[in-house]
Structure formats: structure tokens, C-alpha cells
Image (spheres, coloured by chain):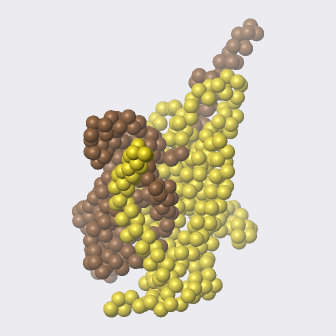
């Protein structure tokens, strides 16, 4: 009996100490995430007017949401553009960063130099820098978009196909610049793979090609998932993102105001979660199979 | 004769295509070609920026001058330096990125340690919420925060960034908490348990045993934190508006600031705002980060590999 009580009190003590360590987080989460999130949701159901005395809320039910979805063509257009760009970018970022990580995992001369170059974007990718570079045309794949044959080819494409391809050509470098952290994640996964598996496979007569598909790729499946999720989130939070800029501008607009901007923020969040869900469905099954 | 030719052929083959022990010439050539090509694609915007920033106004107009300016012209940098109000904005940038980063790293390590070492009710829920804070877009929580800061008179002061960092809600705090969680979980518990038997308090164990052994996680978190705070302009622009001006904030209103210093119409054609001056400003903006990167670049890769950021 006493030992049971002692065990309970020990567990309680452990739990209390644990809560002590995360107390700051609990306070921060409530103050800076939970309360503002609920508050924003409340705004989204109201017409918000900022007056000298404070904020006035007029309940409008879902009017802000229906306006964003059905009456405001700008919002939907930007969200669709964002979704397409994200869906196009994620595989490119993944494939690219995987290739670079595999390269950097090899042994060759001047590896340090190349490594330095490939991680450079992690350090310098910020909104204003990207904006200046894009404005100067420095982020397009050098020269490709100006080749007449390419322009002709683009004109032939149906509209739905044209915008992703155009995006690809004009923002190619930009997409690659978002791969820095992903390369790091792939690289650290690659280094966890036991070298002796490759040796065993080679002795059994597997070619490098087979080893890639049968050993390297499956061992990267968790990293794939982590990277895909990371990519979607960074692209969605990037300050040059057109949807975010539109929401930001609407916050100060006379016609829209805080209520409308809040409603759009939630719709945008929903679209982002759907995109994350798609990515997850695509890659999670694979990752799970590998772990079992 | 036959065998000799055979041997020669084999030698050539292994030289070109490689053997089990070393990679072949052909393979190396392909590898370097690809690496250089990709490296060029990565460096292209930077080179473009740097070269353009050195062009004098006459070079800019001259279609013959593409990649090699005719003279080393530093006038753009002098102008950009003045327009950016460089010493002040640089100090401001350092302040609002280093201070929150230090706090955020320390608090994230506390939270990560608590999650990794203690059993308590609701732990998985906390982990889930930590992930959620990473996913929730900033605009979903921004407006009430801004209004609250305004009420408290903190809008425009560095406290608007320091407070969330102190409570593990800074910019991308979730990632750092997960990094610490991961690295504390992978560290052996033995030393900590021995210290506990000797009667050391939990906080003391954390500070004297856990912190030193997770040093790589601290370094990588701090570096990334500084870089991300430096480059984050959306939140800083909103929270610091009307108060502190950071380097990226000044860059985003470069045109306006330029026209205040050199009003159009009063200056001669060579002093008008051109892309060379803009590129100088952009380069000055990233220069401190480049310096930091080249000094610390070993840590970027090696400590990420050691902390096991992948989170399996």
C-alpha cells in the first residue's frame, strides 16, 4: 500500500517537474497562439471597424467567408495560383535536394566548396532580397524563357498547363533556392544508412543503379515526408507569397478590413492543410512501409 | 598478345568507368560537370547582383557590358550605404535577431528537455500543438497580437519580438523545440540519473549535465535562429513599424528612402535611382549574413548531421 502511494507520488513529482520545464511554452502557447487564433476566428465572423475608442464588432455570420469564396475573384485566383505553384514546386525541390544531397554524400575533391555554395540560399533567402532579384530577372532560368522556340511552345499550351510551365521557367532558381534545409535533412538521413549494406549489395552483384532504387531511396522515405511538409510550409509562409500579400493589404482596406482579412486567413489555412494532406497521403504510406 | 590487349582494355575500362574501389574518369567528369552547372545556377543571382552593383551608370546603359564592368565603380555602394542608413539599421538588425535568438534557443532547450526526459499527462498533445504552431500561418494570429501590443504600447519596440521568443513562441520556435527534443532523447540518461541520486536538483542537472552535452544542438539552433530572424520581414515589419528599422525593412522601402535623399528632378541623370544602386543595397543587406556564414559554415552542416534534425 505504501509503496503504491509512493510510486504515485513519485510519478506526480516527475510530472510536476516536467510541467515546470514546459511552463514557459504553455504560457506562450496560450498567449501568443491560442488566444489570438480564437480571436482571429471571432473577427472573421464579424464586420470589424477600428474606431478611436477601440474596435467595434458587428456580427455578420459567414458573410466574410462567402464574400471571399464567391464574390471576390482576386482571392480565389490567387489561392489557385498558390496551390498550383506549391504542387509544382514540391517535387522539384525534393528531387533537386535529393540529388544534391547524394552528390554531397560522395567523396570527391573540393567537396567543401560545393557544399558552401549549395547551402548559401539558406542564409540569404529573404523577402526583400528575393523581390529585388526577381524584379531584375535574376531568378529566371538564365535565358530559357527568352528563346523564341520556348515562347512559341508556351503559346501552344492550353491555359491550365501554361501557367505552371511559365512559373517553372521564370522562377526556376527561386524554387531551387528553397532547397537548402531540405538538402541538410536528406544529407543527415543518408549518413545514417549503414555503409555495409551497400557493400553487401555490391558483393551480391547489384549495380549502383539498383542500389539506389533498392537501398538509398527507401531509406530516404521519412526524410521525403519531412522535407515535403517543410517545403509546403515554407512556401506557404513566405512573405512574398501573393495570397499573404493580398490578405495583408486587405487588412488595411476600407472595404475589407480586419474581419474579411481574418476570414481569408482561415480559408488560406484550410487550403494549406489540404495541400499538406495531399503531400502526406502521397508520401506517408511509403514512409510507413519502410519503417515496419 | 591476346591477353595483353585484354588487360589493356580492362585497364582502360576501369579508368573510364571506375571499379569497385575507385570512381572512374568518366564518372568524375560527369559529377563535376553537374556540380558546376548546379553551382552556377545557385550562384547566378548572386553573381548577377554583385556584377550589377559594380556597374557605373554608363556601363548600365552600354549593351556591350554584360558581365565585366569597364571600371571598378563604388559610387553605388556609397549611395546605398547612405540610403540604407547602414550603421543604424545594421545595429538594429543585429539587436532584433541576436537577442530573440538567444532567448528562443534557451527556452526551446528547456521545453525540449522537459518533453524528452519527463513523463506527464498530455505530452503527446503538447507535441501535437508544437507542430501546429509551426503550421499555422502567421496571419491567423497576427492581428490580435498587433492590437494587444498597440494597447500595451509595445508596437515598434524590440519587446514585441523578444516577448514571444521568451515564451517559446518566437519565429519557428517549434523547429528548435523539436531539435532539442530529438537530441536530448538520443543522449544517454545515465549521468543525469547518477546526479539525481547525489541529490542535484532538476534545473541543476539540466544546466550542468544536459546543456553541455547538447552543445551542437545549441549552436545549430542559435545560428539558424539568427538567420531566420534576420531574414524574416513580414512579422518584423508589422511589429516594429514606426519604431526600430532593420536592414531588410529599410531595403523594402529603398525607392522611397532614395528619393528622400536624392529627390528626383533635383539631381543629375547619373544620380537617379537605377538597378545598380538597388543591387548594391541588396548586397549590403546580405553581406553580414555572408560573413557569418563563411565564418561558421562548418557548423551549418556538421552540427545538423550530429543533432539528427530529421526527427525519425
- Residue A93 is situated, as x and y percent measured from the top left of the image, at 57, 53
* Viewer-nearest residue: B181 or B194: B194
Colour that chain B carries in the picture: brown
**Corner quadrant of residue A202:** top right
Q: Residue at x 63, y 47 (%)?
A: A287
Assign the C terminus of chain A to one quadrant of the image: top right
* In the image: residue A241, left or right of residue B102: right
Residue at 26% x, 61% y is B95
Q: Residue at x 39, y 52 (%)?
A: A12
Identify the colour of chain A in the image. Answer: yellow
The residue closer to the viewer here, B159 or B26, is B159
**Residue A116 at what x, y percent from top left?**
43, 44
Name the quadrant containing residue B289. Answer: bottom left
Picture coordinates of residue A285 (x, y %)? 67, 51
x, y percent for residue A60: 53, 90
Residue at left offset 43%, top offset 45%: A1
Residue that protrudes farthest toward the right in the picture: B2
Please name whichever residue, B120 or B282, is drawn nearer the observer in this view of the structure. B120
- Between residue A157 and residue B98, name the one nearer to us: B98
- In the picture, measured across the screen, residue B192 lies left or right of residue B25, that is left
Q: From where the camera sits, is residue B119 visible?
A: yes
Amino acid at each position: 500500500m505504501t509503496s503504491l502511494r509512493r510510486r504515485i507520488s513519485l510519478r506526480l513529482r516527475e510530472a510536476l517537474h516536467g510541467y515546470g520545464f514546459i511552463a514557459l511554452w504553455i504560457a506562450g502557447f496560450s498567449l501568443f497562439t491560442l488566444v489570438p487564433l480564437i480571436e482571429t476566428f471571432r473577427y472573421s465572423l464579424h464586420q470589424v471597424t477600428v474606431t478611436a475608442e477601440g474596435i467595434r464588432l458587428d456580427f455578420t455570420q459567414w458573410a466574410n467567408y462567402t464574400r471571399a469564396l464567391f464574390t471576390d475573384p482576386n482571392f480565389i485566383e490567387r489561392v489557385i495560383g498558390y496551390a498550383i505553384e506549391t504542387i509544382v514546386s514540391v517535387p522539384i525541390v525534393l528531387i533537386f535536394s535529393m540529388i544534391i544531397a547524394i552528390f554531397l554524400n560522395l567523396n570527391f575533391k573540393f567537396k567543401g566548396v560545393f557544399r558552401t555554395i549549395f547551402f548559401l540560399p539558406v542564409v540569404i533567402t529573404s523577402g526583400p532580397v528575393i523581390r529585388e532579384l526577381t524584379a531584375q530577372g535574376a531568378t529566371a532560368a538564365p535565358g530559357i524563357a527568352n528563346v523564341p522556340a520556348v515562347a512559341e511552345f508556351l503559346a501552344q499550351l492550353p491555359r491550365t498547363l501554361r501557367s505552371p510551365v511559365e512559373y517553372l521557367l521564370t522562377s526556376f532558381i527561386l524554387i531551387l533556392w528553397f532547397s537548402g534545409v531540405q538538402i541538410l535533412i536528406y544529407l543527415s538521413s543518408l549518413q545514417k544508412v549503414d555503409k555495409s549494406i551497400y557493400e553487401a549489395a555490391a558483393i551480391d552483384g547489384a549495380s549502383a543503379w539498383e542500389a539506389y532504387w533498392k537501398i538509398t531511396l527507401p531509406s530516404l522515405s521519412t526524410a521525403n515526408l519531412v522535407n515535403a511538409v517543410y517545403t509546403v510550409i515554407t512556401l506557404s509562409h513566405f512573405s512574398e507569397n501573393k495570397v499573404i500579400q493580398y490578405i495583408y493589404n486587405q487588412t488595411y482596406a476600407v472595404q475589407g478590413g480586419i474581419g474579411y482579412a481574418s476570414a481569408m486567413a482561415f480559408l488560406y489555412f484550410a487550403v494549406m492543410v489540404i495541400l499538406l494532406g495531399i503531400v502526406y497521403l502521397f508520401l506517408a504510406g511509403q514512409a510507413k512501409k519502410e519503417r515496419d | 598478345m591476346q591477353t595483353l590487349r585484354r588487360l589493356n582494355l580492362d585497364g582502360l575500362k576501369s579508368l573510364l568507368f571506375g571499379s569497385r574501389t575507385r570512381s572512374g574518369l568518366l564518372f568524375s567528369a560527369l559529377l563535376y560537370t553537374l556540380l558546376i552547372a548546379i553551382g552556377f545556377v545557385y550562384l547566378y543571382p548572386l553573381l548577377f547582383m554583385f556584377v550589377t552593383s559594380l556597374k557605373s551608370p554608363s556601363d548600365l546603359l552600354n549593351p556591350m557590358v554584360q558581365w565585366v564592368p569597364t571600371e571598378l565603380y563604388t559610387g553605388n555602394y556609397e549611395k546605398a550605404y547612405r540610403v540604407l542608413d547602414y550603421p543604424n539599421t545594421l545595429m538594429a538588425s543585429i539587436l532584433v535577431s541576436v537577442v530573440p535568438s538567444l532567448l528562443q534557443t534557451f527556452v526551446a532547450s528547456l521545453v525540449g528537455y522537459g518533453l524528452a526526459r519527463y513523463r506527464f499527462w498530455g505530452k503527446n498533445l503538447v507535441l501535437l500543438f508544437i507542430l501546429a504552431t509551426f503550421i499555422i500561418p502567421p496571419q491567423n494570429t497576427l492581428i490580435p497580437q498587433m492590437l494587444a501590443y498597440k494597447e500595451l504600447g509595445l508596437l515598434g519596440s524590440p519587446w514585441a519580438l523578444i516577448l514571444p521568443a521568451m515564451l517559446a513562441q518566437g519565429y519557428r520556435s517549434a523547429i528548435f523545440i523539436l531539435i532539442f527534443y530529438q537530441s536530448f532523447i538520443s543522449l544517454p540518461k545515465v549521468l543525469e540519473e547518477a546526479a539525481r541520486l547525489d541529490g542535484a536538483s532538476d534545473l541543476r542537472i539540466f544546466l550542468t549535465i544536459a546543456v553541455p552535452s547538447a552543445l551542437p544542438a545549441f549552436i545549430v539552433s542559435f545560428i539558424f535562429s539568427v538567420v531566420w530572424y534576420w531574414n524574416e520581414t513580414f512579422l518584423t515589419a508589422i511589429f516594429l513599424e514606426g519604431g526600430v528599422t532593420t536592414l531588410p525593412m529599410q531595403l523594402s522601402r529603398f525607392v522611397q528612402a532614395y528619393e528622400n535623399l536624392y529627390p528626383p528632378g533635383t539631381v543629375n541623370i547619373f544620380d537617379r535611382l537605377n538597378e545598380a544602386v538597388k543591387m548594391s543595397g541588396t548586397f549590403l543587406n546580405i553581406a553580414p549574413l555572408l560573413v557569418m556564414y563563411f565564418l561558421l559554415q562548418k557548423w551549418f552542416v556538421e552540427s545538423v548531421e550530429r543533432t539528427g534534425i530529421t526527427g525519425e
